[in-house]
Image (spheres, rainbow, N blue to C red):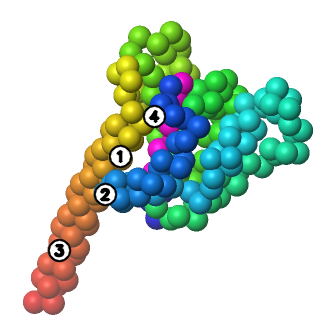
């Protein structure tokens, strides 16, 4: 069975990032148009997951046990959706190579797409892209440049369009595979009929 897609918004710039998940929940119809859903988590869950991934619990005044397993819980709840999912945090942009590897390993049940969102010409953007591209197939690293003052809803509409195009490409591939399988079965049927005559 094919894995579902996961679209992970990593920033470094996400407008109103502290409201991202709440806005995603309100945009259910928009997400449904691309067969997308969100994990059953809160904005606070995503915050703790980012703190865990980046190992910044001390800087945030937390103990490791306060955030331990947070990212795994988010991923488990995403997997329960049994559909393509969208979630993220601008803090994920700060992950180093080892932290990205752990994050992607936790998401191994998905075909993970990283969506980098940044203002045009943001410093360090090339390094961020290269870092993720070194750990994912290039076709699964997407960069959306933001215009100054672009609202979160506009960004989400572009991410949803990306998910819709990805879904269409998947369906096209399935159609091609089914046609090949049908041709092979038709050949087998013809062989059987010829042998019977």
Distance Cα–Cα, label 1 vs label 4: 11 Å
Q: Earlier in the sequence, mark 3 or mark 4?
A: 4
- Does dot 4 land on a helix, a strand or a loop? strand
Distance Cα–Cα, label 4 vs label 2: 19 Å
Query: Few, some or many C-alpha atoms within 10 Å of disc 2 (few <14, some 14-19, many ≥20)?
Result: few
Q: Say the numbered circle drawn on residue 129.
A: none
**Picture quarter containing residue 176?**
bottom left
Q: Which residue is mark 1?
A: 160
Q: Is residue 10 magenta?
A: yes
Does the residue at mark 1 contact the one at mark 2 (Cβ under 8 Å)?
A: yes
Q: Is residue 39 left or right of residue 153?
A: right
Distance Cα–Cα, label 3 vs label 2: 36 Å
**Disc 1 versus disc 4: nearer the observer:** 1
**Disc 3 versus disc 2: nearer the observer:** 2
The magenta-colored residue range is 4-12
Does the residue at mark 1 contact the one at mark 4 (Cβ under 8 Å)?
A: no
**Residue nearest the viewer, comparing 182 with 77:** 77
Q: Earlier in the sequence, mark 1 or mark 3?
A: 1
Q: Is residue 83 visible?
A: yes
**Picture quarter containing residue 58?**
top right
Q: Earlier in the sequence, mark 1 or mark 4?
A: 4
Q: Is residue 139 visible?
A: no
Q: Is residue 119 left or right of residue 34?
A: right
Q: Earlier in the sequence, mark 1 or mark 2?
A: 2
């Amino acid at each position: 069975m094919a894995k579902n897609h996961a679209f992970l918004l990593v920033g470094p710039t996400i407008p109103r990032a502290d409201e991202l998940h709440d806005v995603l929940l309100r945009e259910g119809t928009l997400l449904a148009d691309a067969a997308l859903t969100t994990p059953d988590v809160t904005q606070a869950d995503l915050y703790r997951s980012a703190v865990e991934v980046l190992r910044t619990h001390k800087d945030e005044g937390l103990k490791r046990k306060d955030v331990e397993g947070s990212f795994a819980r988010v991923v488990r709840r995403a997997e329960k959706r049994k559909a393509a999912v969208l979630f993220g945090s601008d803090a994920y942009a700060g992950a180093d190579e080892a932290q990205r590897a752990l994050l992607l390993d936790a998401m191994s049940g998905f075909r993970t797409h990283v969506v980098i969102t940044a203002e045009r010409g943001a410093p360090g953007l090339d390094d961020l892209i290269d870092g993720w591209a070194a750990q994912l197939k290039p076709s699964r690293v997407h960069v959306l440049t933001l215009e100054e003052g672009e609202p979160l809803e506009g960004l989400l509409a572009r991410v949803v369009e990306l998910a819709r195009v990805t879904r269409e490409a998947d369906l096209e591939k399935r159609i091609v595979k089914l046609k090949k399988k049908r041709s092979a079965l038709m050949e087998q049927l013809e062989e059987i009929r010829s042998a019977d005559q």
